[in-house]
């Protein structure tokens, strides 16, 4: 059954606007009486379509359903701005794996130079990718995707998260293997985790030292060196296993 994230919803009725109206009427060819799931502020309701116009679909709530598809830990992925469409891949797959937020940032070794004037369309595209992936994976929320930050702005986020870690390939080379596991053992349901991952060339030693000085824990993601687009999926999968499957 199709799932839609709505901006307007009461206890009894959902209002669907924008591109989802086209999807319902032209792509899915639904009509009055058809059933859909509507998601609003993390809550999910089974609804029945009651009215369709050119720009609006109205649906009555049949019943609110229990939603348990979110990770018990809120995980924010902060990615050093990579080149090409790698960030799109991270957002799509990271959403499927349960990330709650994506924060791109401009790292020293980021090859891409962020253009504020031209970047808004990219941010909108990233948001659309997150929304479609959330619908496909039956999420209750759409992860927030931020406009890229500077490294200094990234540091200012530290107060918003219970724990902060930074993936550092030199730790993997040295054989460090316990820091991430120790963080997991200290996290409790409802806590939050900020994970910083560098761009293709990795983070510089100075960037890592600055993060550590700002209460980030440096750790490896296993003994192998992971690509910038692979590391976020590794940590999200590890969180899912530790907090959802191993308990």
Image: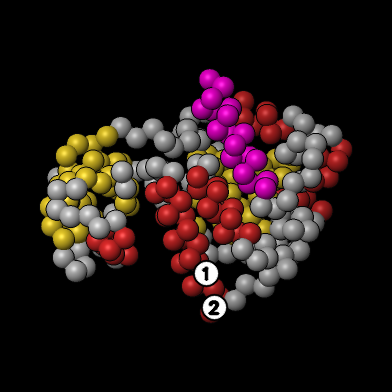
Residue bearing mark 1:
122
Q: Say if residue 160 shows up in the picture.
A: no
- Foreground: 114 or 97? 97
- Tell me if 111 is positioned left or right of 9 in this view: right
Task: Give the main secondary structure, helix, strand or loop, of the magenta stretch.
Answer: helix
The answer to whether residue 22 is left or right of residue 231 is left
Q: Secondary structure at mark 1?
A: helix
Q: Residue at x 73, y 68 (%)?
A: 111
All told, the count of numbered labels is 2
244 on left or right of 174: left
- As helix, strand or loop, the secondary structure at mark 2 comes to helix
- Bin the neighbour count of mark 1 within 10 Å (Cα to Cα): few under 14, some 14-19, many 20 and up: few
Q: Which residues are magenta?
A: 230-247
Residue 168: x percent and y percent? 76, 46
Rendering quarter of residue 81: bottom right
How far across and down, in percent of the image, does residue 240 sit?
55, 33
Up the image or down, 164 lies above or below 186; here it is below
Residue 17 appears in the rendering: yes
**Magenta segment includes 160:** no
Residue name at image x 58 percent, y 49 percent: 77
Q: Percent x, y for residue 141?
A: 39, 46
In what quadrant of the picture does the N terminus appear? top left
Left or right: 192 with respect to 42? right
| Residue 118 - label | 2
Q: Give the CA separation, mark 2 to mark 1.
A: 8 Å
Residue 16: x, y in percent? 24, 58
Tag 2 and tag 1, C-beta contact below 8 Å:
yes
Residue occupying image coordinates x 53% and y 42% = 97
């Amino acid at each position: 059954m199709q799932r839609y994230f709505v901006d307007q919803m009461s206890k009894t009725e959902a209002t669907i606007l924008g591109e989802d109206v086209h999807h319902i009427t032209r792509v899915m060819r639904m009509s009055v009486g058809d059933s859909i799931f509507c998601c609003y502020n993390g809550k999910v309701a089974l609804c029945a379509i009651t009215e369709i116009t050119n720009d609006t679909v109205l649906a009555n709530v049949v019943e609110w359903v229990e939603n348990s598809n979110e990770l018990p830990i809120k995980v924010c992925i902060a990615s050093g701005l990579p080149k090409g469409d790698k960030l799109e891949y991270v957002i799509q797959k990271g959403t499927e794996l349960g990330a709650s937020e994506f924060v791109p940032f401009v790292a020293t070794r980021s090859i891409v130079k962020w253009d504020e004037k031209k970047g808004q369309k990219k941010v909108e595209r990233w948001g659309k990718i997150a929304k479609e992936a959330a619908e496909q994976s039956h999420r209750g929320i759409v992860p927030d995707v931020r406009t890229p930050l500077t490294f200094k702005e990234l540091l200012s986020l530290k107060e918003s998260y219970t724990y902060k870690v930074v993936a550092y390939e030199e730790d993997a080379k040295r054989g460090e293997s316990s820091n991430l596991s120790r963080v997991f053992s200290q996290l409790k349901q409802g806590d939050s985790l900020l994970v910083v991952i560098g761009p293709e060339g990795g983070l510089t030693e100075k960037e890592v030292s600055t993060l550590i000085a700002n209460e980030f824990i440096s750790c490896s993601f296993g003994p192998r060196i992971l690509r910038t687009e692979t590391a976020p999926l590794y940590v999200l999968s590890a969180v899912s296993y530790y907090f959802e499957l191993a308990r």
